[in-house]
Amino acid sequence: MKNSRIILPLLMLLLTASAIPASADSGYQTVYSNWVNSGEIVQANGCYVNITVAGPGYVHAVVKSPEYPDGDVTISTGNSYYYYGVIKIYVVEVDESIGRALVDISKPVDSVETSGTTLTCDVPGQLALGGDSISFPIIIKNDNGDDKTYTLSSSSDAGWETGFMYGDKGIYKIYVPQGQSKTVNLVVETTASSDIGEKKVTAKVDSLSIDLYVYITSVNQTTEISSRYSSKISSIGEKSLYELSIKNIQSTENSYGLSVDGLPENWYYRFKESSTSTDEMAEVIVPADSVKTIILEIVPPYSVTEGEYNFTAKIETPDGVTIEKDLTLKLKSSVGMTVTSSKLAYDSKPGETFSIDVYVTNDGTGGTLTNVNPEVTAPDGWVINCYPEMISTIKAGETQKFTISVQSPGNIVASDYEVDIDVNSDQVMKEKTYRITIATESYIPYIGGAIIIMVLAGLVLVFRKYGRR
């Protein structure tokens, strides 16, 4: 009985020891060693570690810390991941069947801690094109034993503009509490005229400095093209105008060739100085270090169907480099209405009925006129009828005839009158005005004729009676 009391704790100790990885690092001490369920977050030495079982024999680890950039890595069984010298993650075993992993997380032992200020950069050498903007993340660690405010400065042997950013703020000093780190970004603005090759940039934090390098792989564009609106919506039959800005980055005046690629067949384009100009341009001259704005006019044919069309405006530099700007035109169908008649003036008599024929045409492209109906305004007492009273649809290119029957009152005074016809639809309205001249019958000619006949008859009688004497 006594021996069993000794053997049982010894067995438990041996089982526990078997979970510790054999490849221990003497410079680190374990702060967590246990099974972790997939997706579980473990906190260790100020860091947050999210372990996910990614497959047989390996895990996906995401490490977050307020002092360092995020770590995102895949670790296989028997391997370790060192996160900025703050923690080490060692994967002992992965049980994919139940979604868990046995991990050992350790931190550096106190004996390896350093004092003073240290500067580190994970990416001290970067590739870029001339004209690119580059950012170097620099970690400033304060191990001086007290809080410090550091003064920042930088320089470039290529004469580039440099400056420090912290978040979205430009800075030249940074406060770092004792025992903590902060990351600042050294932003380097290369120039388009930079020579190909390696250039050195130096970042200084108080009296400390760190050398960083940019390798220019090729000369960047010396010209930039931009558009105020890259996508426009127009109706079929309309012209579309794009405002393009060409920026000459070089220190000399340049002439640029202009063209468009990707337009459908029978489409027309032209470059113009302004929206009101009628002259077409094949090239444009832009002074040194200046921006020139031009207009690209796109004219689709009337036969085009509605939809989205993509094309590319191209600018060719003097050295043969083509710079492109992708543009989009979305076309929608349009409706239009014209109202015509054979004449606009009619003669009539009091109480007489006459007809006005009105022809309504949809001269749009693709769209349909709906609920088309004439509305007639006439003087009081006039009788108006319309046939048909309404047409539900008139498709593009079609014409519909309306017959307006008009009758004036029988006792109307002879004069000129107006009849207004408004042709309404859900989309558009058009108006026509007609002049109606009402003329009454006159009896004066008949009376005058009768008097003349009577006079002639009297003369005949007189001649017969006295003519023989």
Image (cartoon, helix red, strand yellow):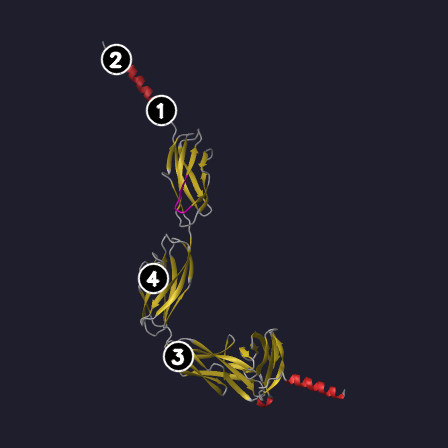
In percent of width and height, residue 329 lies at 41, 59
Q: Which residue is mark 3?
A: 216
Tell me the quadrant of the picture where the C terminus can be found: top left
In percent of width and height, residue 168 lies at 51, 74
The residue under the point 38% across, 30% down is 439
Earlier along the polypeptide chain: callout 3 or callout 4? 3
Q: Is residue 392 left or right of residue 52?
A: left
Image vertical order of residue 11 relative to residue 40, above or below: below
In percent of width and height, residue 42 lies at 61, 77
Find residue 271 and name its label: 4
Q: Nearer the viewer, residue 381 or 65?
A: 65
**From which residue to which does the magenta span run?**
395-401
Image vertical order of residue 86 relative to residue 228, above or below: below
- Within-10-Å neighbours for mark 3: few <14, some 14–19, many 20+: many
Camera-side mark, 2 or 3: 3
Earlier along the polypeptide chain: callout 2 or callout 3? 3
Give how far apart the Cα atoms at labels 3 and 4 are: 35 Å
Earlier along the polypeptide chain: callout 1 or callout 4? 4
Camera-side mark, 3 or 4: 3
Give the residue furthest to the top. 469
In percent of width and height, residue 404 lies at 42, 36
- Within-10-Å neighbours for mark 1: few <14, some 14–19, many 20+: few
Find residue 444 and name its label: 1
Please say if the residues under marks 2 and 1 sit with CB atoms less than 8 Å apart. Answer: no
Q: Nearer the viewer, residue 382 or 158?
A: 158
Q: What kind of residue is marked 1?
A: Ile
Earlier along the polypeptide chain: callout 2 or callout 4? 4
Camera-side mark, 1 or 4: 4
Give how far apart the Cα atoms at labels 2 and 3 are: 132 Å
